[in-house]
Amino acid sequence: MLIEKELSELTVGHYVVKIIQQEGCFSLTAAGHIKSKAVINHLKSKNVHRVLIDDSKTLLSSSHEKSATVDAPSIVKNKELKHAKAIFDQSKSIQKKLFHDALSGSCLDLSPVVEVTNKSIDAIFNSPDSLACMLNIREKDEYLLEHSVAVSVYITIFSRYLDLERHIIEQLSIGAFLHDIGKIKIPDKILNKPGKLTVDEFTIMKTHANHSIAIIKETPGISALSLEVAALHHEKLDGSGYPFQVDGEDISQYGRMIAICDIFDALTATRVYKEGFTHGKAFSILRELAKQGQLDASLVDHFIKCVGVFPVGSLVQLKSNKLALVQERNDKDPINPQVHSFYSVKLNQFLNKQEIDLSGSEDSIVKSVRAEEFDLDMKQIVDMLLMEG
């Protein structure tokens, strides 16, 4: 029986035939079952108000429970992603409190930083791709909060790849978490300026590194290594960095590592006034900086291998003219990961999700892309494909 339903009445298991009422011009690729709440949320975002369902095809909740048990690996991944999101959100909350304390001149409390960075390390050791995926769905207007969290995650992933000892990783993660705390001392009109900074403005901007060092030095319980890695994040091997123009021979491996992580995140992050580069473009820039003698070339190569040619959570365009989200890396065949295709570039509309192992497919990746190029929202995409299962 065909029945009209308000979107508020739509539930998982309903079989949608067509859209009856909407404010936009969204169209369904084909009739089909609502498989998750994320699909309903997506219809809401497209201002769909009423749909036609075939009630004879409605799936009972028990059927969902039965079918859900079949896809155990996906359920595990979704749980890991939700856990990663909780850690990321907690990290941002702690970062916000740190900035507030630093601005007021209060001493920083290191204990919540130690707690949350250890959670991150545990999550990365158990499922390195989950937190990495979270870095691709950040908020444009929260760059200041999220950048230090992201750099901490990247240096942890990098350290694990290089097989560093746990106690070293913990100190690097804390140092990275705090490395930009001094930016709270920089005037907003300079810190958030959309265009290129003047010479005088850049001189002021560079003082954030000095402020960070001073604040971290006064933090009870901070280790020498955490302070070192934060202090070196803007130093370059050719001596052109700041704040102290440290010579390359005096920049430790850890200082070289955080410089790479810091630049990579700055390049790939999308901000209110600037779209981030694709991972491939950012890798090219890192290699060029290494060629110029600013970054450690060997560590840059290791970092790229560590993050992956097509990182989990990144967006790619396929030869079939579909967009897909990288679901799982393929270390044996890095250019052919497992992906979720979900969008037709040609039709300019969403498709039913399809999981594809590109190593055994005729399809292939043409290039890395940004969601903004197709007027899409990355967070919504990930919510649809991963968060809700």
Image (cartoon, rainbow, N blue to C red):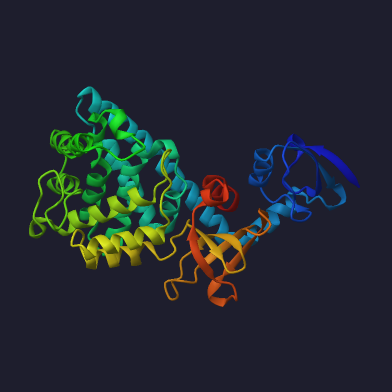
Residue drawn 43% across the image and 71% down it? 334
Q: Is residue 93 above or below residue 342?
A: above
Residue drawn 35% across the image and 61% down it? 283
Q: Nearer the viewer, residue 66 or 265?
A: 265
Left or right side of 25 for 198:
left
Residue furthest front as drawn: 198
Q: Nearer the viewer, residue 271 or 61?
A: 271
Left or right side of 63 for 267:
left
Residue furthest right as drawn: 1
Q: Nearer the viewer, residue 206 or 38?
A: 206
Q: Is residue 148 above or below residue 160?
A: above
The answer to which image quadrant residue 175 occupies is top left
Q: Percent from the top left, x then y, of residue 294?
A: 19, 58
Q: Percent from the top left, x then y, of residue 297?
A: 23, 66
Q: Percent from the top left, x then y, of residue 110?
A: 23, 36
The answer to which image quadrant residue 256 occupies is bottom left
